[in-house]
Amino acid sequence: MGNTRWYTVRLLTKLDENNSYSNILLDESLSRSDFDKRDKKFISALFYGVLERRLTLDSIITDLSKNPKNKLNYTLRNILRCGLYQLKYMDSVPDNAAVDESVELAKKCRNPASAGFTNGLLREFIRREKALPKTNNEIDRLSLEYSCPKWLVAKWMNECGKDKCLSLLETSLGQAPTTIKINNLIGGVGETLDMLLAEGVTFERSKMLEYAVNVANAGAIEKTEAYKQGRFHVQDLASQLCCKTLDPQPGETILDLCSAPGGKTFTIAEMMNNDGRVLAFDLHPNRVKLIRSGAERLGLTCVRADVNNAKVFNPNLPLADRVLVDAPCSGLGVIRRKPEIKYKDPAEFDRLPVIQAEILDTASWYVKENGLLVYSTCTVSKAENDEVVKQFLASHEDFEPADSNDAFMQTITPDMYGSDGFFIAKLRRRG
Ligand SMILES: C[S@@+](CC[C@H](N)C(=O)[O-])C[C@H]1O[C@@H](n2cnc3c(N)ncnc32)[C@H](O)[C@@H]1O
């Protein structure tokens, strides 16, 4: 097991140094390693666990360090984070093993004092009965308990109220579900599910959507024969609900302006029985390739993918029956999948509403009379959701809510259907 811990510490350190995406870094390096299944599971649990609890773990380190101003190097900090995580959150690891293994790793550090420091800090944590540092107010307490930055706790408390905020915090931790969208154009649903079952994949069909299936042991889902045959793609339930809101019909022209990697494009094309035109765009050429290869695997010949900047009006694009703007956003609805999002500097998110408004305004030019414009994000943030839509409606008299009551704007939170956090607004161009 020592090897798996050192491996995890090195991966976490790489993440600190390079700012890369956690899932890509872990998947790529594990697939190149020769660890067995059990070791890989341990490494993943420790890696993601430390990442999602990083704020809490660092607060404990600061609290217990005799000299908190003493800067720890990345490696030693990650050894301590991993040790504390095992002590506090991994019941399967005995306390002595967590401490001893961490001390062994600390001996690999250049500073000879590291091992003693690690031993002292971890043992002090046990002596204090693994209590979290004391806090003075509720925001600080929740921030520490859920490893969520104070600004985000305060924001959700303010915007959603205490109960919703608590449920957002609760569902921001732990394993995210894996949902697939069955391709109704290749074989029957039953046939595809039988194939998955035969390959050892267990699942539960969604009660909300006919072609949505929750997969339990999703590890190698993209290695299955059913996947290779294009019988499904991985897509969260909320994204599938977004496509349902767009409600594309066979024979129509659809524009999907922020489309990569293409999940919604594929579902839209399948809902249209591959009949009509789905014009899918993204700003980044490499990501456009993902749309093309996905559509090809799924046999969706009605999809055409190209590079296009959604902020700038493109006179070559046709008027469309329905236009989807699945906008770039802060991603606060998916921090369970990508914990690094919550540690970003919130100032980075300030520019997003302006970009979103620009894209939505440009998108509106492509909508036919009586056509639909759907705006969506995978974030829970009024500034990027409700406010963008309200301002759009205020400055575009030719558009109206597509549903008569408040239902035209929907904030989906993970507690509702077990999906990601998501926002969908459905607007119509007046006739
Ligand atoms: C939320 S993701 C889209 C996810 C996609 N709709 C799906 O379901 O798979 C937002 C996408 O917008 C793209 N994007 C960002 N700025 C853009 C712009 N100005 N024009 C077009 N695409 C843009 C990003 O590259 C990213 O792929």
Image (cartoon, rainbow, N blue to C red):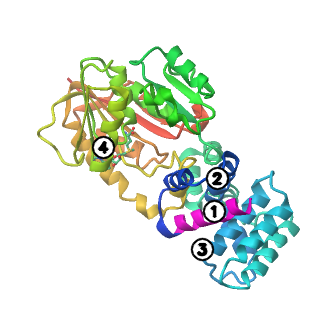
User: Is 70 in front, or is 389?
Assistant: 70
Alpha carbon of mark 3 to alpha carbon of mark 1: how far? 14 Å
90 left or right of 421 in image: right
When the figure is inspected, residue 214 is found, relative to residue 331, above or below; the finding is: above
* Sooner in the amino-acid sequence: mark 3 or mark 2: 2
What is the secondary structure assignment of the residue under circle 2?
A: loop
What is the secondary structure assignment of the residue under circle 3?
A: helix
Alpha carbon of mark 2 to alpha carbon of mark 1: how far? 10 Å
Task: Tell me the amino acid under the disc marked 4.
Answer: Lys
Task: Tell me the amino acid under the disc marked 3.
Answer: Tyr
Q: Which residue is the site of mark 3?
A: 74
Are the residues flagged by discs 3 and 1 in contact, CB closer than 8 Å? no
For the residues carrying marks 4 and 3, which lies nearer the camera in this image?
Answer: 4
* Sooner in the amino-acid sequence: mark 4 or mark 3: 3
For the residues carrying marks 2 and 1, which lies nearer the camera in this image?
Answer: 2
Q: Residue furthest left?
A: 315
Are the residues flagged by discs 2 and 1 in contact, CB closer than 8 Å? yes
Local packing at callout 2 (Cα closer than 10 Å; few below 14, some 14-19, many 20+) is some
What is the secondary structure assignment of the residue under circle 4?
A: helix
Q: Which residue is the site of mark 4?
A: 289
Q: Which residue is the site of mark 2?
A: 35
Residue 141: image location, x then y, percent: 70, 60
Task: Tell me the amino acid under the disc marked 2.
Answer: Phe
Alpha carbon of mark 4 to alpha carbon of mark 2: how far? 32 Å
Q: Residue visible at 23% across and 48% down?
A: 309
Question: In the drawing, what numbered circle is on residue 7?
Answer: 1
Prevalent SS, magenta region: helix
For the residues carrying marks 3 and 2, which lies nearer the camera in this image?
Answer: 2
Q: Which residues are magenta?
A: 1-16
Alpha carbon of mark 4 to alpha carbon of mark 1: how far? 32 Å
